[in-house]
Amino acid sequence: MSSDTITGTKPVSLTQGAINQLKRIHNEQNLSEEHGLRIGVKGGGCSGFSYVLGFDVVKEKDEVYEIDGFKVFMEKSHAIYLLGMEIDWVDGLNNRGFTFSNPNAKETCGCGTSFSA
């Protein structure tokens, strides 16, 4: 699939809290229309993998999705780790930041951003 083609299936979901925070960040950083939300994984972290979440431009290996008004970029190979995941924003007294509810994670660590599959 071409990196500039938007696919129909949503591999992950965003809560309203996450959407609001991502819109705020996008506006504050004054990003261009070509910037989309990169969601992925990388090796490392307490449990073997950690999540990647940030704004970026499309890369050659990316699949492009439209999720809740955002262009989302994800490498096809990352889908097996992320399919069905929900991203939320928590703004509480003890915890503030994005959270990842991943049905594919066998174990997670206390930091909430690392998992094993």
Image (tube, helix red, strand yellow):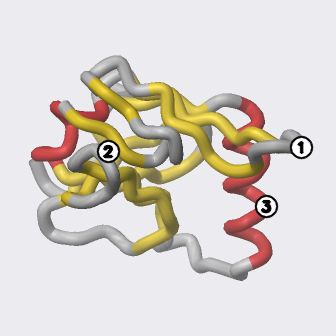
* Vertical comparison of 79 with 39: above or below: above
Of pointers 1 and 2, the one earlier in the residue sequence: 2
SS of the residue under disc 1? loop
Between 15 and 109, the residue placed more toward the observer is 109
Other residues around mark 3 within 10 Å, as few (<14) / some (14–19) / many (≥20): few
Tell me if label 3 and label 2 are in contact, CB under 8 Å.
no
Can you identify the residue that label 3 sits on? 24
* Vertical comparison of 32 with 68: above or below: below
* Quadrant the C terminus occupies: top left
Can you identify the residue that label 2 sits on? 6
Image location (x, y in percent) of residue 85: 41, 27
Other residues around mark 2 within 10 Å, as few (<14) / some (14–19) / many (≥20): some
- On screen, residue 38 versus residue 74, left or right, reads right
- On screen, residue 98 versus residue 102, left or right, reads right
- Cα distance in 3D space between marks 3 and 2: 24 Å
Between 4 and 18, the residue placed more toward the observer is 18
What's under tag 2, amino acid-wise? Ile
Q: How many marks?
A: 3
Image location (x, y in percent) of residue 68: 59, 36
Tell me the mark number nearer the camera, choosing from 1 and 2.
1
Tell me the mark number nearer the camera, choosing from 1 and 3.
1
SS of the residue under disc 3? helix
Residue at x 81% of width, y 43% of height: 94
Between 109 and 77, the residue placed more toward the observer is 109
* Vertical comparison of 102 with 91: above or below: above
Can you identify the residue that label 1 sits on? 93
Image location (x, y in percent) of residue 102: 39, 26
